[in-house]
Image (tube, rainbow, N blue to C red):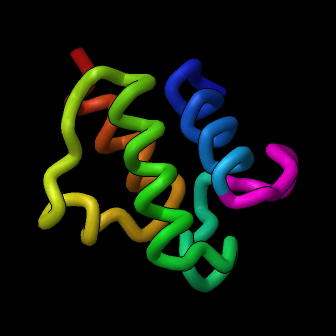
Amino acid sequence: MSDIEAKVIAILSEKLGLSESRIKPTDRLVEDLNSDDLDFAEAVMALQVEFGFMILDKEYLELKTVQDIVDYVSKNKK
């Protein structure tokens, strides 16, 4: 597991109230992790703080899985 993946999973775990061991890269945020809009918005804010960049609204709506987030952060982090 990469550092980015571990940090993303830790943030999602905290914001969604799930254990880190429950969260897998292939998990879909809504269908598998039962994330609602508020949970995901809070997770996105935490990701922005952790990684130091803004996630645009139109882009964050395209993030469907944990791996989508990891890939996005890997591509855009400072």
Q: Residue at x 30, y 43 (%)?
A: 72
- 57 vs 65, left or right, is left
Q: Position of residue 26 (x, y in %)?
A: 59, 62
Residue furthest bottom as drawn: 31
Residue 19, placed above or below residue 33:
above
**Camera-side residue of 38 and 76:** 38
**Res. 47 image quadrant:** top left
Q: Residue at x 63, y 66 (%)?
A: 27
Q: How many marks?
A: 0
**Res. 60 image quadrant:** bottom left
Q: Which residues are magenta?
A: 16-24
Residue 6, placed above or below residue 55:
above
**Res. 75 image quadrant:** top left
**Camera-side residue of 44 and 24:** 44
- 36 vs 74, left or right, is right
Q: Residue at x 13, y 66 (%)?
A: 58
Q: Position of residue 23 (x, y in %)?
A: 74, 55
Q: Quadrant of the C terminus?
A: top left
**Camera-side residue of 54 and 63:** 54
Residue furthest top as drawn: 78
Q: Position of residue 30 (x, y in %)?
A: 56, 79
- 35 vs 44, left or right, is right
Residue 44, placed above or below residue 3:
below
Q: Residue at x 68, y 72 (%)?
A: 33
Q: Position of residue 10 (x, y in %)?
A: 68, 36
Q: Quadrant of the N terminus?
A: top right
- 16 vs 46, left or right, is right
Whether the magenta-drawn stretch holds residue 13 is answered as no
